[in-house]
């Protein structure tokens, strides 16, 4: 029952709904053109291989293509009975919630038995949503405080630290949860834990971007198709001299400060340094190729469109090798979003505490299904784009799709719903459902980091080793 | 430390310092006996209910260091939550003794020299950035659309510790600085004169419209001719830009094939003559170069419909947005761009040295305002150097160089962060005063969420701000920028910022108030079941069933009137909450009117929504409510009622939590993990759904749940007469709503009016304290800690003595130690002659 049909267009201008779909249609059409391109060369920078260092195997497949990794998060767990397939092994029968992935079945792994024990309640009491969200990529226990935030470095940032300098952007942080509510967050935990997935240090969250237009312009430059590269180049030139000035300013400012205040300036200086590095790289590797599609609109009203736009931008970022590491927070854990467009007006979080009421379970299963459907569309597009070495973009990627809550009703954090999509350039064995019998999820992350060519990390978060069979 | 003379769990080593002795005596003679009488039943002698045992510290140091435990004791004692109502209660005097002991000996608070705490270096949040740019440069930059949301702490987005700066945000600051300066500061001394003629400034022969520079719409179906006249002061080459747009009223399923011919003529000659058909909302831009002599030049648009008789289905129209005339384009004819003299008041000198001085002067002044304090010569030199490095390049103007340096100022951390220094006299003190510039910024960001204005700067430069605090405070509150206090403080304290986006499903909400129709209910269920399955999977019998269910189910929707939280109602609700607060603030009325007032602010749409009669027009105005009206005060404001609801129904628990958090200041503990499922309250009801009251009653049966829900549920249930859209209702699921209840502190009430009275009569101090704490947190930019108890107590005492006036609250805050001072940090290096600040 869409309320859009009740909206006749207003006087003077075309209906908003038309304008939004107009942009989306154009964007899709443009994207269709990308998908139809036989080779990737037209979008990769000319001297890509020069920046790739295949000998070191850093974020590169054995066939010389870039190796990418991304982490996508969905909130409030998934109904286990509908999520887990019946039987383990290869050629598994997709479960009800995973049905949209049936066509891609041989390119995904359903991973069972991974835990995040640090998200479980301890002496710190309630707050499973803040913990689930914050622990997912960090594997450490969140410090329970409204203001004194202390998490840990997240795995994507740990990887980006080593492979980030191969690409123009060390990493990309995205979200479809662009609005914030006022008021306190979960049980005395800072809101920072729930609205951020990536952390570059225990107290610096990597704030994700929610506006498709903003991300797009940041990656490819402002202006219309054809103007972007020139605009981006001009901007880089102007920024150089400014950065010199502010760097000096910041250093002398920092000397006047004590303790905690210096940390804030450190965050500033890190940002400046990163920008300077990006300018240097742009000079070495050239600007990112213009994808020649119209700039997307700012945040769409329709959630499905928002999600699809963000997935499209993620795909473009990988396709143009703007980055090889990304995170996407579809919605923060604890999200109480209403899914009126699929006939579920109640809040997601409210429903997830279903108390075994079958109607509520059915609704939650449909929400889980909705999120998987969006992911499936993304994977399909990724599988159609040909990469440098003839394989698909999906083949040369490792995409984690999961959540920090397992059973949303009981707030459990063991046997988390996690999928691993892609073949990792041939280093993964997809097309299976494997139960790992209670290992830390961080073991999976270590194994992924290994494949990205990162200097072997001894441990990460609460890891106990590598995950052998992925 | 204290003497331990007792059979108890304490041990002590060593002789007692002399200063401890009185404390020991006071504790043993007065406080300990009271703890034994009122507390040890549950929190001593081996018992430790709630994990609290007041005699089980195994050393003196631990006893005094357990400040959070004693802080909880203090808070619970003051809120009358402890001892619980069913146990014997200490007298007021006894409580006072315990409270004073905690404050003096455990917290070691010195009322004459309180610890002001330390605020971590604060960066401007989105709102502050936007306002500061507006006041510094007159540019309206959409920071809220471009920057990511700020992380919050304690419910506010201006808490220094929590405001982090990711590399992505830094990049945005740089891009923003460029855009803003590009928009504000001209880079050439002369520009081509430009005049924009709005569409509606073209008139037809007979119309008497008043033009205001907006667009003009001409229908595709009606011939029209509209004219204007441009007076060229000088002869020369001109450029015309004509902006048009094709519009329609979208109608599903039909197409409009009408066409028209549009011509644009200048001086009688047609420059444009073109056919337009359906275009789908497309803009058009046409550019023409002309050579004009001085004098009048008539221009006109004419529209000729080409398809008379064709069906006119989509109200096609051609919009003349504007005609822009630029010229003469010759260099000598150039005029000063907008704002030129604001940024470049003097002619540009010729010599390099003189230019450098001019640049230094301009940039020094700009930086002083942007950094909100005096700027050292070294910085101005470097800025002038940056400007010079740009303007000596071929093709770059002096103005462009200065503009580039201004971009550097806006990108500097001294603009983005609020630097504070210590007053010169404060050198070496443990809790020195912040200097006058820092005080000016603290005041302006507190009351205006923006930078200090010229008067505050002058007072700070003269060193007279601190002694003129009260008159400056009054001036700032009367300024229209003080609306920021309502939008940002009230918007977050009462969460009225969320009203425009909160998801509420009107149909589900109103459905609870309708008569229960079992046929309807069954039809709805069956419809949903069948509708979810793909159509080709249904048997013909099922398809027929689906069609039937659809008819029965939808019948109910056509009957009920279309009521919803429309955007205009939501906006009016937000304004209601803001204006009520603003009214009390500006007129210095008793703050308790926030709990129980006999008025509110509405406009016609909101009044209709609330069922208030005799209100007409879209402006918000104050209305006095009839004496029997349940409305008035925060609790019945639409924002609060909607924001504390679920998308499909009210949530008494959330409403209770809201009141505990924001009004009484006794937040309930978060829910424990592993909540067991509630027994099904609907089990015994065959012909209807249970009301929320019945469902929640099950909470109270389990003592584990009751401990917190006894606090929350009665408060929320008192508001059950207001549905999730803030509208009054008498019944839910055909059962009359029962709003009566009892607070956990004992007071009984039978409806919302009585609850409000109870709050005013018995919990005024709790409210004052909560409001003070919230406002102080917002003003300081940090959460409060145990050492702030004295400051809060002093402000609350001042509030009560004044009869609850906001002026007392605000004065109390700006005069308080945490607002006026800071902690000296010995670890901060003192470079040159700048003081080490914290």
Image (cartoon, rainbow, N blue to C red):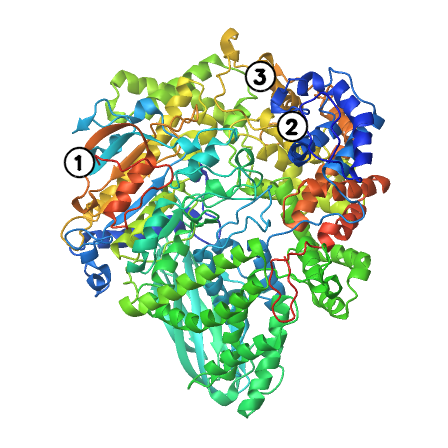
The answer to whether any part of residue A1 appears in the image is: no
Taking A446 as reference, is B626 above or below it? above
Image quarter of the N terminus of chain B: top right
Left or right: A26, with A90 as reference point: right
The residue identified by callout 1 is A106
Taking B837 as reference, is A205 above or below it? above
Q: Chain of mark 1?
A: A
Which residue is rendered at x = 40% and y = 30% of the image? A343
Image quarter of the C terminus of chain B: bottom right
Q: Classify mark 2: helix, strand or loop.
A: loop
Image disc number at residue B704: 3
> Which one is in front, B351 or A455?
A455
The residue identified by callout 2 is B57
Spatial CA span between label 1 and label 3: 49 Å
Spatial CA span between label 2 and label 1: 61 Å
| Callouts 1 and 3 close, C-beta under 8 Å | no
């Amino acid at each position: 029952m869409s309320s859009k049909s009740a909206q006749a267009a207003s006087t003077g201008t075309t209906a908003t709904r038309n304008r939004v779909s107009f942009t989306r249609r154009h964007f899709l059409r443009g994207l269709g053109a990308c998908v139809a391109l036989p080779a990737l060369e037209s979008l990769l920078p000319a001297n890509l291989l020069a920046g790739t260092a295949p000998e070191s195997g850093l974020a590169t497949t054995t066939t010389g293509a870039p190796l990418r990794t991304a982490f996508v998060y969905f909130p409030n767990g998934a109904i286990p009975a509908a999520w887990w397939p019946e039987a383990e092994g290869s050629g598994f029968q997709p479960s009800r919630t995973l049905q949209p992935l049936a066509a891609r079945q041989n390119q995904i792994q359903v991973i069972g038995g991974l835990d995040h024990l640090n998200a479980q309640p301890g002496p710190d009491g309630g707050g499973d949503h803040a913990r689930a969200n914050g622990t997912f990529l960090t594997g450490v226990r969140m410090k329970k405080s409204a203001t004194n935030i202390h998490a840990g470095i997240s795995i994507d940032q740990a990887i980006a630290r080593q492979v980030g300098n191969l690409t123009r952007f060390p990493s990309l942080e995205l979200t479809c949860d662009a609005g914030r509510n006022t008021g306190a967050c979960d049980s005395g935990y800072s809101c920072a834990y729930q609205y951020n997935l990536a952390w570059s240090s225990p107290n610096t969250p990597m704030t994700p971007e929610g506006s498709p237009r903003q991300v797009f312009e940041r990656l490819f430059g402002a202006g219309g198709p054809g103007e972007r590269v020139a605009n981006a180049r001009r901007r880089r030139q102007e920024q150089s001299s400014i950065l010199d000035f502010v760097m000096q300013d910041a250093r002398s400012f920092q000397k006047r400060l004590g303790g905690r205040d210096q940390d804030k300036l450190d965050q500033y200086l890190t940002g400046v340094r990163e920008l300077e590095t990006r300018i240097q790289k742009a000079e070495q590797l050239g600007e990112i190729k213009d994808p020649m599609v119209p700039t997307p609109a700012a945040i769409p009203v329709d959630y499905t469109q928002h999600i699809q736009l963000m997935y499209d931008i993620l795909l473009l970022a990988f396709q143009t090798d703007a980055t090889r590491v990304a995170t996407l927070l579809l919605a923060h854990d604890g999200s109480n979003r209403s899914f009126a467009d699929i006939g579920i007006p109640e809040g997601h979080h409210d429903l997830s505490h279903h108390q075994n009421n079958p109607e509520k379970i059915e609704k939650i299963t449909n929400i889980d299904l909705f999120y998987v459907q969006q992911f499936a569309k993304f994977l399909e597009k990724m599988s159609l784009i040909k990469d440098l070495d003839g394989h698909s973009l999906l083949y040369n990627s490792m995409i984690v799709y999961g959540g920090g809550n397992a059973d949303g009703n009981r707030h459990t954090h063991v046997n988390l719903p996690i999928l691993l999509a892609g073949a990792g350039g041939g280093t993964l064995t997809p097309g299976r459902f494997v139960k790992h019998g209670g290992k830390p999820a961080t073991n999976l992350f270590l194994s992924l980091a290994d494949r990205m060519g990162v200097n072997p990390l001894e441990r990460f978060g609460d890891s106990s080793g590598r995950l052998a069979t992925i | 430390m204290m003497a331990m003379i007792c059979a108890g769990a304490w041990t002590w080593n060593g002789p007692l310092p002399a200063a401890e002795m009185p404390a020991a005596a006071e504790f043993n003679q007065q406080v300990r006996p009271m703890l034994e009488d009122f507390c040890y039943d549950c929190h001593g002698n081996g018992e430790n209910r709630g994990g609290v045992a007041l005699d089980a510290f195994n050393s003196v140091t631990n006893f005094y260091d357990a400040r959070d435990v004693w802080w909880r004791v203090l808070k619970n004692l003051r809120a009358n939550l402890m001892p619980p109502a069913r146990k014997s209660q200490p007298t007021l005097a006894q409580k006072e003794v315990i409270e004073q002991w905690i404050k003096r000996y455990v917290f070691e608070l010195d009322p004459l020299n309180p610890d002001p705490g330390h605020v971590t270096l604060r960066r401007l949040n989105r709102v502050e950035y936007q306002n500061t740019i507006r006041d510094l440069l007159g540019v309206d930059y959409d920071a809220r659309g471009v920057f990511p949301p700020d992380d919050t702490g304690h419910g506010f987005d201006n808490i220094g510790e929590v405001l982090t700066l990711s590399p992505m945000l830094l990049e945005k600051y740089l891009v923003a600085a460029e855009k803003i300066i590009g928009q504000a500061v001209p880079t050439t001394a002369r520009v081509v004169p430009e005049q924009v003629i709005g569409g509606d400034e073209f008139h037809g022969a007979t119309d008497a419209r008043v033009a205001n520079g907006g667009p003009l719409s001409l229908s595709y179906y009606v011939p029209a001719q509209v004219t204007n006249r441009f007076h060229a002061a000088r002869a020369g080459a001109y450029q015309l830009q004509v902006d048009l747009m094709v519009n329609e009223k979208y109608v599903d399923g039909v197409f409009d094939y009408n066409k028209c011919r549009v011509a644009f003529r200048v001086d009688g000659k047609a420059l444009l003559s073109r056919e337009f058909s359906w275009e789908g909302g497309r803009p058009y831009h046409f550019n023409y170069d002309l050579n004009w002599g001085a004098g009048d030049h008539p221009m006109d648009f004419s529209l000729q419909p080409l398809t008379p008789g064709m069906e006119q289905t989509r109200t096609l129209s051609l919009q003349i947005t504007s005609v822009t005339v630029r010229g003469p384009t010759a260099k000598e004819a150039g005029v000063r761009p907008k704002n030129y003299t604001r940024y470049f008041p003097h002619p540009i000198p010729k010599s390099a040295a003189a230019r450098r001085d001019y640049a230094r002067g301009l940039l020094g002044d700009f930086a002083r305002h942007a950094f909100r304090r005096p700027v050292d010569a070294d910085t101005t030199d470097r800025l002038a150097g940056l400007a010079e490095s740009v303007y000596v390049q071929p093709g770059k103007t002096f103005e462009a160089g200065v503009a580039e340096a201004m971009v550097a100022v806006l990108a500097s951390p001294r603009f983005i962060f609020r630097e504070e220094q210590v007053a010169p006299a404060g050198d070496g003190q443990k809790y020195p005063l912040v200097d006058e510039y820092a005080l000016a910024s603290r005041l302006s960001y507190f009351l205006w969420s923006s930078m200090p204005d010229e008067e505050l700067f002058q007072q700070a430069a003269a060193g007279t701000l601190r002694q003129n605090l009260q008159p400056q405070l009054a001036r700032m509150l009367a300024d229209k920028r003080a609306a920021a206090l309502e939008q940002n403080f009230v918007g977050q304290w009462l969460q009225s910022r969320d009203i425009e986006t909160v998801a509420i499903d009107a149909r589900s909400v109103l459905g609870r108030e309708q008569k229960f129709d079992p046929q309807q209910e069954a039809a709805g269920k069956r419809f949903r079941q069948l509708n979810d399955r793909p159509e080709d999977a249904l048997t013909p019998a099922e398809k027929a069933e689906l069609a039937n269910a659809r008819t029965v189910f939808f019948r109910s929707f056509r009957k009920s009137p279309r009521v919803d939280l429309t955007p205009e109602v939501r906006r009016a609700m937000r304004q209601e909450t803001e204006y009520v607060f603003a009214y009390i603030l500006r007129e210095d009325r008793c703050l308790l009117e926030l709990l129980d007032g006999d008025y509110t602010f509405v406009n016609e749409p909101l009044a209709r929504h609330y069922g208030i009669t005799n209100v007409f027009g879209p402006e918000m105005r104050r209305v006095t409510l009839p004496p029997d009206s349940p409305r008035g005060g925060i609790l019945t404001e639409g924002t609060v009622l909607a924001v504390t609801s679920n998308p499909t129904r009210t949530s008494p628990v959330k409403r209770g939590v809201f009141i505990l958090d924001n009004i009484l200041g006794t937040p309930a503990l978060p829910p424990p993990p592993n909540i067991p499922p509630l027994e099904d309250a609907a089990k015994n009801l065959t012909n209807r759904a249970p009301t929320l009251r019945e469902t929640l009653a099950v909470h109270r049966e389990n003592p584990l749940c009751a401990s917190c829900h006894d606090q929350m549920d009665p408060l929320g249930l008192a508001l059950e007469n207001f549905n999730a859209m803030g509208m009054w209702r008498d019944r839910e699921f055909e059962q009359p709503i029962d709003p009566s209840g009892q607070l956990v502190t004992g007071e009984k009430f039978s409806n919302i009016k009585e609850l409000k009275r109870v709050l005013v009569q018995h919990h005024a101090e709790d409210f004052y304290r909560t409001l003070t704490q919230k406002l102080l947190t917002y003003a300081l930019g940090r959460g409060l800690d145990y050492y702030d108890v004295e400051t809060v107590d002093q402000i609350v005492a001042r509030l009560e003595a004044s009869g609850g006036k906001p002026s007392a609250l605000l004065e109390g805050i700006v005069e308080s130690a945490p607002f006026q001072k800071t902690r000296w940090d010995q670890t901060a290096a003192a470079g040159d002659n700048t003081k080490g600040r914290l």
